[in-house]
Image (spheres, helix red, strand yellow):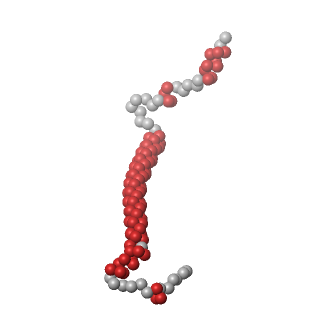
């Protein structure tokens, strides 16, 4: 029953050792080494370019985050200033309302010796 041995021989073809591995002391074929060196240089160049590109992207990302953070901080400062100015305006408007009360104006006018002449007063409506 030589059939299983025959199948095993067909499934795993083997080449003689002298064809697959060069003997010690024999130089490699010229074309093989040149092509291999060419690919090695190309691979090194590609890896270098890839790493350089990754580094540039990382630095640009970091710079963008720093700029964004600074801009957000400046925006918050402006918003805080805007709120403070708004509150100050409200306080000043309230003070104007208090100072322009009718009874206060009449009192100051009497202290200064002014009299109310109702004939010269006109009511203006919009």
Residue 9 visible here: yes
Percent coordinates x, y for residue 80 in the rendering? 39, 60
Relative to 39, say whether 92 is above or below: below
Relative to 109, say whether 64 is above or below: above
* Pick the front one: 36 or 123: 123
Percent coordinates x, y for residue 57 in the rendering? 43, 51
* Pick the front one: 4 or 42: 42
Q: Residue at x 52, y 83 (%)?
A: 124
Query: 37 left or right of 7?
Result: left
Q: Residue at x 41, y 50 (%)?
A: 58
Q: Quadrant of residue 95?
A: bottom left
Q: Quadrant of residue 92?
A: bottom left
Image quarter where the C terminus lies is bottom right
Residue at the farthest bottom position: 120
Q: Residue at x 39, y 85 (%)?
A: 115
* Pick the front one: 33 or 77: 77
Query: 13 left or right of 77?
Result: right
Residue at the farthest left position: 112
Residue at the farthest top position: 1
Percent coordinates x, y for residue 1 in the rendering? 67, 11
Q: Residue at x 40, y 70 (%)?
A: 98
Relative to 27, say whether 92 is above or below: below
Q: Quadrant of residue 113?
A: bottom left
* Pick the front one: 65 or 4: 65
Residue 60 visible here: no
């Amino acid at each position: 029953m030589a059939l299983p041995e025959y199948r095993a021989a067909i499934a795993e073809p083997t080449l003689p050792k002298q064809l697959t591995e060069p003997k010690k002391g024999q130089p490699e074929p010229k074309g093989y080494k040149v092509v291999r060196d060419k690919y090695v240089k190309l691979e090194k160049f590609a890896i270098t370019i890839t790493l350089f590109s990754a580094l540039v992207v990382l630095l640009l990302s970091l710079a963008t985050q720093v700029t964004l953070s600074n801009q957000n901080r400046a925006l918050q400062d402006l918003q805080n200033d805007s709120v403070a100015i708004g509150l100050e305006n409200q306080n000043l408007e309230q003070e104007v309302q208090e100072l322009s009360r009718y009874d206060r104006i009449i009192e100051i006018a009497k202290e200064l010796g002014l009299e109310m002449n109702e004939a010269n007063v006109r009511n203006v409506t919009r």
